[in-house]
Image (cartoon, rainbow, N blue to C red):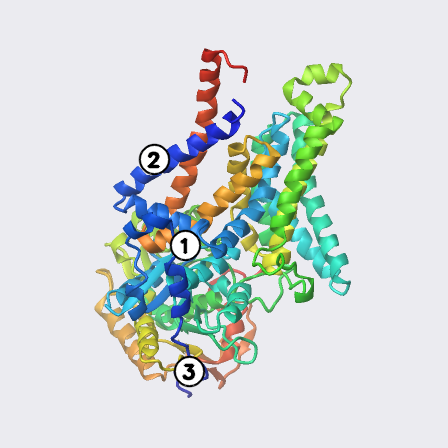
Amino acid sequence: MKNPKLEMKQDCAIDQSRRGTLKSLAGLGLGTLAGSFGIGNAEAASKVTMGFLYVGPRDDYGYNQAHFEGKSAIAKQSWIKAVDQENVPETIAVQKAMESMINLDGAQVIFPTSFGYFDPHILKIAPKYPEVMFLHCGGLYDAKKHPKNVGSYFGYIDEAVYISGIVAGHTSKTGKLGYIAAIPIPQVLRNINNFTMAARSVNPKITVQVVFTGGWANPVKEAESANSLIDQGVDVLTCHVDSPKVVVETAEKRGVFSCGYHADQSKLAPKGFLTGAEWNWSKIYLDYATMIAKKQKIPNLIRGGFKEGLVKSSPYGKAVSAKAKAHADKVRAQFMKGNFVVYQGPIKDNTGKEVIPKGKGYSQTDIWLESMDWLVEGVVGKTKG
Amino acid sequence: MAFAPFLIPLTALLLSLALFGVFVSLAGADALAVYHSIYRGAFGTWFSWQNTLVSAAPLMLTALCTALPARLGLIVIGGEGAMVLGGLAAALTGLVLIDANAWLALTGMALAAMLAGGLLIGLVGWLRHSRNVNETISSLLFNYISIAILSFLVIGMLRDPETLNKPSTHHIGETHMLGALGETSIHWGFAYGVIACVILWLLYKRTTFGFAVDMIGGNVRAARLSGLSVGRNIFLVCLMGGAAAGLAGMVEVAAVHGRANTSLNAGYGYEGILIAFAARHHPLAIIPMAILFGGIRAASGLMQRDHDLPDATGLVLQGMIFILLLASEAVFARLALNKGFKA
């Protein structure tokens, strides 16, 4: 078995001398009025300036909040200046927002956190600012194709989803779990498959019903799907949408259990919240800031799971049994050691076709897993139509 | 009172800025510093100006989709749908013409986009005239249908398998992309917007067609009695409005994304409605209004970054400007009557 190890390709560095732009911009303004405005570029000069862009609101209890929490954690450091912008659409607006952070705030490193910011937006702007580093959340970097001042980072959050699946499997009484997902793309399918296999490792009779809502932020459909799944007898719900808030709240209101995603939603469901898969961005953001401050080279690609500290599980809720905790903790310890392989054959998809033969295993870092287009046995749902 | 048409909106603008200052002070920010950020982010440097103009580009075209039919007394809010379908049609045409030369491909894409958007809003006009379907409701619903068609096709049969986690159509090819204006970072969409506003203003101001449209807007029965074909004119005006929004979709595909995907549905169509009303449906007034609103869009980021204000702050400013502009019209009309002015 191959350990999922933190990949680091070190072939690029950041030039620290972006001060020219700052100085030339500092003189702008409304003439005499300018003096009274306390927008200090001077203090920024001694700090590491980082810019963050989110596609949704900072407080969405989900994907964007996870990044905002990461940013807020590092912003407490006195030597870091972190600026951020929420609700930036995946249009030319994000190109302009990135340039504005560079030109007006003097950002040395930009974190465009939404998947859709990469192509074409980052790829278009990065070559214009070779001394600024663009680090994209999504793990798309390809040294052959992409500019050197671009990098990407991503976590194997499906490991944490696997842990949620174990807890869900132990907790469910009806044997029916529900998964509300945005669209059938590889990343989402991998989470659904992990969740299902984990639950079925507890009880092979468990089924997971999937509903695709068709969009990342579709609260009305998310609520409708949650209600209809509960009506069908589902007693543990989880989801992969930008904000799990609606799903978790609906589950709580209807008296069923829920597993969270992206950030910690335990506050939203004090009774039924079990655990959840969370990102742990504060660690990697601090690592990046330290590298910049020490003028070290920034690796172009960083990926990792539990072991590398990029993902974590939400604290267990009240309803989680001691047995479930013990089982989940045991598997997590294996992930921490890097010797747990989720995709170990034989594995069939939910049409009965064998997708991974006996004896064949795909470890976490295997690129084949990133083009996943099938649902594992036990999932009720289809990826197409 | 020759300055009146400029004086009133300017006063409304200053009033809304003052009101906005009160708002941000209540939100805990320093109002003067916020004004400075808006100025810096929107108009303070050539870099900011380019941001503003790029943001304004699609807004001019989508505003025309509401402004043109408004002269007939119709309230059409289908700019978003027309833009989405226009972008989709442009991407498809771009893929069909992928081996053609760039001029032919871009012309084909623009025409296809205008046709798609035009037919959508044309249908709204036809339904209104022939079936008495309320145009506001039908155009609103057509937005949802258009967005659903787009998602269905880009997630389904038109999807480039390479676009794993962000479903999109295939790329139209880098050589067929619409470039920037000269040395700037402003794409051609801005020029399209200005040209469209000027041409349509001339059309309304200087041709019998424009006169006919104003007449129908003024009094349908009188227009009919004068022998004007009301249905045909409604259809044509809606067709032109939809074509403008469709062209905005083509610009998004050809100048920004290179593909059609759900990013086409970014709210430009809805913001266009606001601009059309703020410009009182005057094609030329749309240009400065779109630049003003584009500037607020461009500055909204700096307001967040400098002052920790939420993103919605920019929307609050837009809303204040919008309401005060519309209210100022009514207030002035009353003042003018009282003082015996001829408005």
**Quarter of the image with the N terminus of chain A in it:** bottom left
- Amino acid identity at mark 2: Leu
Disc 1: host chain: A
Residue A199 found in image quarter: bottom left
Dots 2 and 1 on the same chain: no
Question: Left of B14 or right of it: where is A274?
Answer: left
Q: Badge 3: few (under 14), some or many (20 or more) residues near its Cα, within 10 Å?
A: some
Measure how far apart labels 2 and 1 are at the Cα level: 27 Å
| First reached walking from the N terminus: tag 1 or tag 3 | 3
Q: Do the residues labelled 2 and 1 touch (CB within 8 Å)?
A: no
Dots 3 and 2 on the same chain: no
Please name the residue shown 71% across and 18% down the image. B223
- Amino acid identity at mark 3: Glu
Disc 2: host chain: B
Residue ID for mark 1: A56
Question: Left of B43 or right of it: where is B73?
Answer: right
Disc 3: host chain: A
Q: Where is residue B269 in the image (x, y as percent from the top left)?
A: 55, 43
Q: Which of marks 2 and 1 is in front?
A: 2
Mark 2 lies on a secondary structure that is helix
Please name the residue shown 56% across and 80% down the image. A144
Residue ID for mark 2: B19
Please name the residue shown 49% across and 86% down the image. A359
Q: Where is residue A65 in the image (x, y as percent from the top left)?
A: 34, 58
Residue ID for mark 3: A7
The answer, for residue B323, to whether it is visible in the render is no
Q: Which of marks 3 and 2 is in front?
A: 2
